[in-house]
Amino acid sequence: MAIVKPFKGFRPKKELVAQIASRPYDVLNSEEAKIEAEGNPLSFLHVVKPEIDLPEDVDHYSSAVYNKGKENLRKLITDGVFFQDVEPTYYIYAQTMWGKTQYGLVGCAAVSDYLNNIIKKHELTRPDKEEDRMNHVRVTNFNAEPVFFAYPDNTKIDSIVNNYIANSPEYKFETSDGVGHQLWIISDKNHVETIEHIFNTEVKYTYVADGHHRTAAAALVGQERAKNNPSHTGNEEYNFFMAVHFPASQLRIIDYNRLVKDLNNLSKEELITRIEKNFKVENKGANEYKPKELHEMAMYLNGEWYSLKANTDTYDDNDPIGVLDVTILSKTILDPIFDIKDLRKSKRIDFVGGIRGLGELKKRVDSGEMKVAFALYPVSMKQLIDIADTNNIMPPKTTWFEPKLRSGLVTHSLD
């Protein structure tokens, strides 16, 4: 069963939270982060993207960068911008986007659960990205940003959450992207103990939704600290890391689309003829066309949109990986037609989150940067859980979760 532990969070003063909250480190590059934090010394980007406070030619993975992040976080604490809660608690973090609100519990997941596969994963991680976030955790001694988890819906937890959200939140603000953010403090000791007990007796697994590299980094640093501590007991704070746990039914996955740089020496007509071996192809004209259902894709080529409906012999509904449209696309188009065999290494393919819209695909093809785009129907939470439960791994760039968690609302010290 899952361990989800209350903790004494460090968090900002109420009147400053809107200035502090930032987008997570991995959704914007250093230049974008510098622009976004300009004129706002309290932005949490100074902690999670500290290279923005250093000369432009600095190595983003140098000790100077991680030390600057530590310095900036310590300053927020010593200046009284951040304070620590006195008692271990849970926090309810709500996000409202497109008229829908999701309510997550902020608590600490266990390093042991990650290592023992109680925390289920669906993506591979890259060692270089793991090491970057490990260094950030090692040097700052904090889980500065939460990771994004899901868990099977539980009516008892829902009941406690509903009891709190009926009251005014501790934090409430809206970000420039139109997403509303609220945070409540679960202060009742009986509620805290009940939540911990429910997870430990009724929730068999939790699932990494977004933030696989941060999750791996937090767990590996905890494991590292345990090995280096001769007095290790298993109760130290480094044995746990901060995560926001959302009921699975509340989460929204949006599409994650593909762009290809060339037609592999094929003409438009030759490409369509080859695609027709595995798909019913229908020209939809110049207006943007979005897939309507599973196993339908949209293709943008030479100023026109096409519907591609996969033939039934191209997928297996009983195979958690084989049923995915990203698998069908790779197996029937990207590999045999474009000769793109490794999505992680190929320089001829790029990926665009659906939050940018179909217009982004059209723009990049029309500019000549790319030759063809493929828009996919979103993966469902059921598909994600089926894959994680069977210890399978999704193809790269399959899921895109929105809204993204804001960083800086709560942080967790490893001491």
Image (spheres, rainbow, N blue to C red):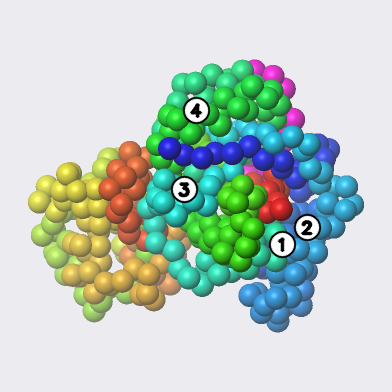
**Where is residue 237 drawn, in percent x and y?**
65, 50
Q: Given the current orientation, which residue lies at the most extreme front position?
A: 231
Query: Of residues 173 and 406, which is closer to you in this image?
Result: 406
Q: Is residue 371 at all visible to an observer of this figure?
A: no
Q: Which residue is mark 3?
A: 113
**Where is residue 56 drawn, in percent x and y?**
72, 77
Numbered range of the magenta stretch: 166-178
Instruction: Residue 140: give its label.
Output: 1
Q: Residues within 10 Å of mark 2 (few under 14, many from 20)?
A: many
Residue occupying the point 69% across, 19% down: 167
Instruction: Residue 75: give its label.
Output: none
Task: Give how far apart the Cα atoms at labels 2 and 4 are.
Answer: 33 Å
Contact check, label 1 and label 2, Cβ < 8 Å: yes
Q: Residues within 10 Å of mark 3 (few under 14, many from 20)?
A: many
Q: Residues within 10 Å of mark 4 (few under 14, many from 20)?
A: some
Q: Earlier in the sequence, mark 3 or mark 1?
A: 3
Q: Secondary structure at mark 4?
A: helix
Contact check, label 2 and label 4, Cβ < 8 Å: no
**Where is residue 151 drawn, in percent x and y?**
44, 36
Task: Give how far apart the Cα atoms at labels 3 and 1 are.
Answer: 23 Å
Is 335 inside the magenta-drawn segment? no
Q: Which residue is mark 4?
A: 198
Q: Secondary structure at mark 3?
A: helix
Q: Is residue 49 left or right of residue 344?
A: right
Residue 64 vertical placement versus 394 (above, below): below
Residue occupying the point 49% across, 43% down: 149
Residue 129 vertical placement versus 377 (above, below): below
